[in-house]
Image (cartoon, rainbow, N blue to C red):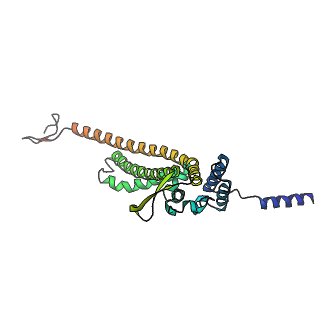
């Protein structure tokens, strides 16, 4: 009987226990809300609203409600131009969303991208170098093309996150009401500024640091491939210049002084 009661109590406790299977975005939203409440930068109701929205399945500010803030605070800015919604678009982007992954997952996707670009670059490289004769130059040329594509993608991801980071941390943002010809400047209210700066500090800045390292690595690979290809081309040209050239004589064609008819 005692063991049955203990099992029943354990089952009830497990049934009423809150779910802890939160996504990375939800954990970030809860951490930002908690730190904002502890630092006194967000009103308690705003922080609690952000936590509730995170538990419901999303980052609090991404649903247009502003993470528990009064939605009228940002009414002047179109939804798609609000920094917090731009951040959500980055998280869900086909390439920009890679930056939010762990380092291993991010590098794995970049490696697959490099392999795909290498396969695409091989026919182009074959037009300049014959694979059967100039194998090293052919591989370096295809690798150079793959590194160029990879670097371009990482640079695009970096500039997108840098743009959103600046808008999150800035006290005033520019937006367009209907087009480029009617740009306006919006001064963030204190609550909106505090929320945006928390997101920019605790979520975006670590991602920017990771992107810088990855960008330096891809640039290094690009420069290494370019220098290696240039070096092998120079070696090949130097060797070819030292090969005796054929000359026509009265008795026939002589390649050098050691070759006779």
Whole-percent x, y for residue 157 in the image = 46, 52
Q: Which image quarter is the C terminus in?
A: top left
Residue at the spot x=92%, y=58% of the render?
2
Q: Is residue 227 left or right of residue 186?
A: left
Q: How many marks?
A: 0
Whole-percent x, y for residue 5 in the image = 89, 60
Quadrant housing residue 56: bottom right
Tell me if I can see residue 59 in this picture: no
Foreground residue, 75 or 253?
A: 75
Q: Residue furthest top?
A: 257
Whole-percent x, y for residue 30 in the image = 65, 53
Tell me if I can see residue 181 in this picture: yes
Residue at the spot x=15%, y=41% of the render?
246
Instruction: From this view, report whether residue 150 is shown above or below residue 77.
Output: above
Q: Which image quarter is the N terminus in?
A: bottom right
Foreground residue, 137 or 78?
A: 78
Foreground residue, 51 or 36?
A: 36
Q: Is residue 172 left or right of residue 251?
A: right
Residue at the spot x=38%, y=42% of the render?
223
Q: Residue furthest left?
A: 250
Q: Residue furthest bottom?
A: 178
Q: Residue furthest right?
A: 1
Whole-percent x, y for residue 109 in the image = 50, 53
Quadrant housing residue 236: top left
């Amino acid at each position: 009987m005692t063991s049955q009661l203990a099992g029943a109590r354990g089952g009830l406790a497990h049934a009423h226990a809150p779910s802890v299977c939160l996504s990375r975005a939800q954990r970030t939203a809860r951490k930002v809300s908690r730190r904002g409440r502890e630092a006194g930068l967000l009103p308690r109701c705003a922080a609690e609203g952000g936590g509730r929205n995170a538990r419901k399945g999303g980052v609090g500010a991404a649903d247009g409600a502003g993470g528990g803030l009064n939605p009228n605070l940002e009414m002047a800015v179109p939804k798609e131009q609000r920094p917090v919604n731009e951040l959500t678009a980055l998280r869900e982007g086909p390439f920009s969303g890679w930056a939010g992954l762990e380092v291993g997952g991010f590098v794995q996707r970049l490696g697959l991208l490099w392999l795909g670009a290498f396969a695409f670059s091989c026919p182009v490289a074959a037009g300049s170098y014959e694979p059967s004769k100039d194998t090293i130059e052919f591989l370096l040329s295809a690798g150079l093309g793959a590194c160029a594509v990879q670097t371009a993608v990482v640079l695009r991801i970096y500039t997108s996150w840098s743009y959103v980071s600046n808008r999150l941390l800035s006290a005033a943002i520019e937006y367009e009401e209907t087009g480029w010809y009617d740009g306006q400047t919006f001064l963030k209210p204190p609550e909106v500024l505090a929320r945006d700066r928390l997101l920019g500090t605790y979520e975006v800045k670590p991602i920017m640091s990771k992107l810088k390292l990855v960008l330096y690595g891809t640039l290094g690979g690009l420069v290494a491939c370019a220098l290696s290809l240039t070096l092998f081309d120079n070696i090949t040209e130097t060797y070819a210049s030292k090969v005796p050239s054929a000359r026509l004589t009265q008795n026939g064609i002589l390649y050098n002084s050691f070759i006779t008819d």
